[in-house]
Image: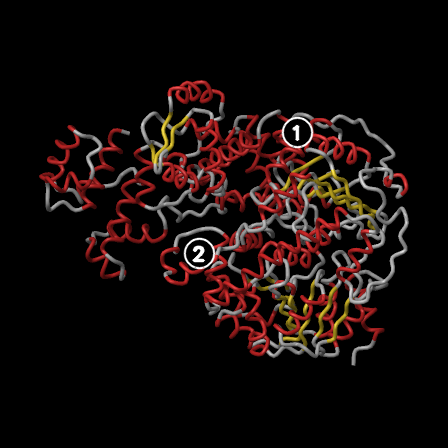
Amino acid sequence: MITDELIYKTLKDRFGYDTFKPGQLAVIRSVLAGQATLAVLPTGTGKSLCYQLPVYLLGHTTVIVSPLIALMQDQVAQLNYQGEKRAVAINSSLEPRQKQLILGQLSQYRFVFMAPETISQPTVIQALQQCQIDLLVIDEAHCISQWGIDFRPDYLVLATIKRQLKPRATLALTATANAQVRHDILTKLDMQSANSVITSVDRPNIYLGVSQQVDEASKNRFLKQLVMESQGPGIIYFSSRQKTVEIATLLQETTTLKVAYYHAALSTKERFTIQQQFMQGHLDVICATNAFGMGINKADIRYVIHYHLPQNIESYLQEVGRAGRDGKPAYALLLATAQDMYLQQALISFGIPEVGLIQRFYQDPNLFKGSQGNEFELLRRYQQIGMEEQAVSELLKNRQKEKQFALQTMLDFLNLHGCRRQFIVNYFDEDPRQIEHDDQCCGEPNSTAFLEKLNLKKITNDKAPKTAGLDHWNGILKQLF
Amino acid sequence: MMLMAYLLCLLTPEKRRYQAIYYTLIGKRTTSNLYAGLAYGLLKWLQIYPNLEQTQFQVELKRLQTGGLVEIDARYVWLTTAGRQKKAEWQPQLFWPTHYMGPQMGHLAQFTARFLLAIQIVSEYQHQNTQYYPLATSMKDRVWVASWFKRHKSVPNFSTQLQTELTQLLAQLDTKQADLLVNQFIGHHILGKSQQQLAWALDSSPLTIRVRTLDAFAQILGLLLTSELGYPLLTELVEHHGSQLSQSTLQTWQLIQHGATIEQISQQRHVKVGTIKEHLLEAAILLPQFPFTQFLIPGITQKLAVMMAEKPTLSFNEAQAALPQLDFFVYRLYQIQRQVSTG
């Protein structure tokens, strides 16, 4: 029996904290007691701690299934940074020889991160069966639900994997799951008797604002004014790469802010540099697509602005959740023009194959062997995991409907007359509590008056010119060594 | 804008297969792409833009078309008169690499990643810091650099020696190029500048910065490959067995050099004869000293020469109509020889 005293001691010794955030302790106790556990904790409230801490008390291997390579690598880097060397990510970026090497000594690792498509490989299963697995963590567990925003067919094999690996406990983690998705997670992971730890999605220190602008020009003016007046650092999210560049350039050229843009098409080195600069406080604002943010563990982000309407309220909330992790006031602002709504409408069917295509694909998959695009990726994965044409058709039809519904919810949120915080709590929470609405909660549309009320108005306006030109190479070399 | 200008300069009034150009830029090494790269004189830009996305490429072509600078059909793209004029105007304004040589640059990205990571690790080590985020690289490169570091770290003055090597190396670059490069280095308390920041600071475009950086690294790689003795530490970061050939082609090529025939190699490696021939075509395109005469029979090549003198674009079908025994391999190899010899 592991006592709370020991848990708190580990919290202090390993992570340097004295207290837990809501939900964390309950999840940790449940996991340590060997209970299957579903934890729904909002972004920014320390989900990873829920499995990281038990690892040090259980002592063997913990396997974490994670949907994205970049996310896994960030998590390993984060653990390495905390001084944990026994962490590894096994995914398609490994060379066969290295993978073999790591699999051969898998039990030496405390943290093993895996993509769902990797964990189902026979050699990987075999290697895992040689380890004593304390805990199987399904991160971003909402990916298993076809009702979820990021449905990943590969997640469907995880129940089978779980039976094969027989972990001491299983932990499904997610930040955003409404009742339907939670039910789906529990069923598909075959853990109906799990303990559920669900904390409210509400993050009281984040002000929720919206602003509808007539056109892009006025949106840009409003945005520029807002970021110039705001205490940073902050993130502006876009749904187009081109726009991240455009607006970053606008801000760079017309303000004294230190700006960067970030999207998936930048080189690895470029992304690394920008991410590190942001983490270490060298940038005021970053203009990014949703490629930025996962694994970003920066506590003092003061605002998250959405330049384009997000596709659904789950993504919105996840991105907003990156603000104010230090518990101090922060704000989220959702910008929109009528045009943006059409854009999102058009994006809904993007990447979802139509019935005709599904039919042709199932008749003759070879026809599409070299075809690229999300549609084909998706169909190939479905076929690989043995789904029939009829089932795929139905699933995708529902998916389209879901996406439509999700966008409608987003629009409702945007056009809401009333408390937006209450809306979110009602949408996600099991027992939605009554929010005490005030002017620090969500406030008037199209106004920047909240900055003053929240004490987020920039006090100093440093007019220091941005450095032009480059440092001499020889000087930098001397500094380096 | 900048990408569009670069692309325009890769085109001519003669029709070029646009997919072949795209594949040349991203470095897809199929024989037909390599041959197109050779025929278009674009092989020197092989793999210069590995993460250029197909959609982006198409968008840029479309913009050129909308601007009336090119014409496009189902397979080909070519310059209009306006396009030719624009090309003459833009070409001298763009930065063109002088050290980047496509076929030899297969390992450039890997070398760059290792080089930067090595500098970061040694810099942090020199400042006795173990708590930092290592530069994101592939696991393979990280393992490689870590073992390089372990081999050397106990040597006295290790970091001084590395610094000396770097100083000597960088002194050979144009100062502007050296500054551009070193401002991107990462190390202890040094985060480096991103290429977008450099572009803003120099009033340039990110793509130009990208191309200049690439060329600076190409120069460094070239220096390390040619003067091994001068830079013992840095040279170890270069993959030496890496030739310009892909792994499988390299094996075929080595067997050929040991006197094996195509059929023997096919049997020994359990690979189809057709594939072995593809390997040889790749070698013929990429290797400067390829022994064409070993595979071409004078009687046939003379006939081909006569036909191609009349019609340089002679297709395989046309050639085969006149020479029923003609093998595609021989036809293509002869074409390559013509291209290589006319440069």
Of badges 2 and 1, the one in the foreground is 2
> Do discs 2 and 1 belong to a common subunit?
yes
Chain where mark 2 sits: A
All told, the count of numbered labels is 2
Residue A357, label in figure: 2
Residue nearer the viewer, A337 or A469: A337
Answer with the quarter of the image where residue A116 lies: bottom right
Question: Between disc 2 and disc 1, whose residue precedes?
Answer: 2
Front one among A274 and B61: B61
Instruction: Using the image as rendered, state which of residue A136 and residue A279 is in the foreground.
Output: A136
- Helix, strand or loop for disc 1: loop
Q: Amino acid at mark 1?
A: Asp
Looking at numbered disc 2 in the image, what kind of residue is underneath it?
Answer: Leu
Which residue shows up at 42% across the image and 47% down it? B240
The image shows residue B142, relative to residue A18, as above or below, that is above
**A91 on left or right of A218:** left
Which image quarter: residue A211?
A: top right
The image's mark for residue A471 is: 1
